[in-house]
Amino acid sequence: MSIWEYANPVKFMKTSSMVLPWVSILSALCIVTGLVWGFFFTPEAANFGSTVKVLFVHVPSATMAINIWVMMLVTSLIWLIRRHHVSALAAKAAAPIGAVMTIIALVTGAVWGQPMWGTWWEWDPRLTSFLILFLFYLGYMALWGAIDNPDTAADLTGVLCLVGSVFALLSRYAVKFWNQGLHQDSTIMKVGQDDPLDPSYYVPLVISIVGFVLFFVTLLLLRTRTEIRARRLKALEQRERMA
Amino acid sequence: MMPELGKYTATVLLSYAGTLGPMIVLLGWSLWRGAKVKAALAAQEERMKKNG
């Protein structure tokens, strides 16, 4: 069996209808477990006090903001190279989820930054690249909405996605590229190294991230199914007008 | 049951509200649009079947 079978809309609709209930239940379970654990059962941090609890919503949303763009890049490349419509529609369906995750990361970061850094906003490399990534998400959605021909829209948004990937990568690695600014480097991958994340935060954080990933998959399947139906509806309406 | 958040109560609660609020709105919007498009497609298919 090949992965390209799922490029067939009928096969995609059939498989996604079977997977969707399980993914959504798992997503809800992981988000509730991760956030309840993080909010109620983690200790205050020595440096950050109770604001450490913001970690359990900020880190998963920021992680998703970048990775959703990477997923859009992959599906856009599949569209541009192999012309599979489901992949183009999946990229379109993912964009609003990515935009929401980016704005959540920016807002929770600002709310945390005010008491910790003494400012809501700083033109720090990571914060700035995240803001640009958010603008790319808005531009991507606006471009889909502005072009009537869906194939042309998929082509142009695919190219925009390629360009925006530079900022998605910058958002991820800005702290390493420019060793300046307020935002710290990721600590979740430092287990077993110097200055690791305390295990009491690590487990609920990982559960929360898994929950956000599954939430994205749930919404992606749901929204891609809607896009496939909307495409079919448009085609039927056109056929009726021409008859 | 509410944990002691001290002077950062507003910061922590705002962060959780600012995360869960948009996620719930996005989920609701996606479900609403999905149901709307599904109903419209079913109606269109029915109409075309009737008209041959």
Image (tube, rainbow, N blue to C red):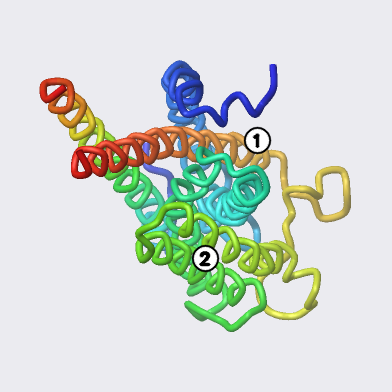
Cα–Cα gap, marks 1 and 2: 21 Å
Q: Which residue is mark 2?
A: A109
Q: Residue A72 placed where, x, y %? A: 58, 51
- Tag 1 residue: A203
Which residue is most to the front? A243
x then y, percent, for residue A130:
57, 69
Residue drawn 45% across the image and 62% down it: A103
Q: Nearer the viewer, residue B34 or A176?
A: B34
Rendered position, A78 above or below A11: below
Above or below, A96 relative to A178: above
Q: Say whether residue B22 is visible.
A: yes
The disc, 1 or 2, on the residue closer to the chain's N-terminal end is 2
**Residue beneath the point at 49% across and 72% down:** A115
* Quadrant in which the C terminus of chain A appears: top left
Amino acid, disc 2: Gly
- Location of residue B18 with respect to A142 vertically, above or below: above
| Three-letter code for the amino acid on which mark 1 is drawn | Val
Q: Please name the residue shown 43% across and 38% down the image.
A: A224
Chain letter for mark 1: A
Q: Relative to the observer, which residue lies in front, A137 or A227?
A: A227
Q: Is residue A44 visible?
A: no
The image quarter containing residue A182 is bottom right
Q: Nearer the viewer, residue A37 or A15?
A: A15
Mark number for residue B28?
Answer: none
